[in-house]
Amino acid sequence: MKIADVKSHVLMYRLDEELGYSQQYYTMRTAHIVEVVTDDGVSGLGEAFGGGGVALGNKAIVEQTIRPLILGMDPLDREVIWHKVYNLLRDHGQKGMPLQALSGVDIALWDIAGKILGQPLYKLLGGAFRDRIPAYGYGMMLQRVPDLVQRFAAEAAKIKGMGFGAMKMKIGLGPEEDLKLVEAVRGAIGDDVKLMVDANHAYTAREALPLGRQFEKLGVYWFEEPVAPEDRQGYRDLCQALDMNIAGGEAEFSRWGFRDLVEGRCVDVLQPETCGLGGVTEYLKVRDLAHAHFIPVVNHVWGSAVCVALNMHLLAAMPDLPGGAHPVQPMLEYDTTPNLFRENLLAEPLGVLDQVAANGGWVALPKGPGLGIALDPEFAARYRVAG
């Protein structure tokens, strides 16, 4: 069996309302789906992190740079393929878009392996440590509206009403405005719901520290990306000064990038983005590196239903840390903001929201070989960007 083709499908549509985070606002929703096809007709799906123009740039990397390097290779030689691509692109970027593009290809190769062997991905990774996964609802994105505080409070109450026992919100407007937002959300959901805040590296450590102390009083579970990913010392300072968890890692790439983050004890919770850091092959190394230092891993999940399905497998196969009769369970991040590519992309939807509502915030393991999913071809064709 050989790799016969590598295809890159960028899907886009315009949102009804502008959404944002501390770095930008956007009006387009994007998904970048990578498909690897073998000469036996078996195909696998992956996803590459990055929206808008980044997705279009990554499409070129997948099809014009990576594809020629791996055509004719055995799709089961995932490590060989990964290192060949990485080594040949090393001089042109050990981080960022080349790794995002490689991630989509690598994930598709794991999907192919599962289909060939007739096993779900979590079986290929060593089996399931749990038969269900707790999910947390991500929402409350920034908007340029005068009633943002009221909108955040209403949306938080809605997410709680969906059945989520934990949720995450965006911040990054400035310390005073951020504190108002967090206070409003905490007031709307009460003290029994776990609350996380995500600054998307909006602050310096000097700015983030007093804000973090206020968040501690509000029972915030983790403060995500408080400072720029390059600011290792800033992360360390916050970890040492605050009792609240400091989370980060979504903007890091490869085992080498995560090595310094982990060995430097820069985070209390590590958040690898498998669709960006190098795919499943590299994610496993990063996960084990974190666990070797007894740092919990809660995967970053931002993308389409392909990304969600992938992470359900990864979380099912994540070992308990540190182990014991009553381990803390890793959570599935689930975006509740409008996204057709999360709810309508698959021939058979994942049904996460229905499961959360019915099961008290938990979702069942995915079924079927590989990722256990297939695209709805008509839906995907409707939103595919030409070129």
Image (cartoon, rainbow, N blue to C red):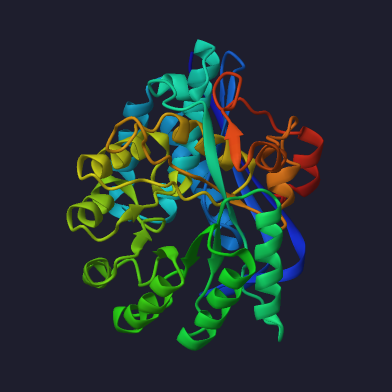
Q: Position of residue 326 (x, y in %)?
A: 37, 34
Does residue 273 show up? yes
Q: Residue furthest left?
A: 263
Of 268 and 10, nearer the camera is 268
Q: Is residue 371 left or right of residue 81?
A: right
Q: How many marks?
A: 0
Q: Position of residue 313 (x, y in %)?
A: 50, 31
Q: Position of residue 309 (x, y in %)?
A: 58, 35
Position of 316 relative to 156 (above/below): above
Q: Residue at left 35%, top 71%? A: 228
Q: Residue furthest front?
A: 191
Q: Residue at left 24%, top 72%? A: 241
Q: Residue at left 51%, top 80%? A: 178
Of 150 and 78, nearer the camera is 150
Q: Is residue 253 left or right of residue 67?
A: left
Q: Position of residue 196 (x, y in %)?
A: 48, 62
Q: Residue at left 26%, top 40%? A: 291
Does residue 3 show up? no
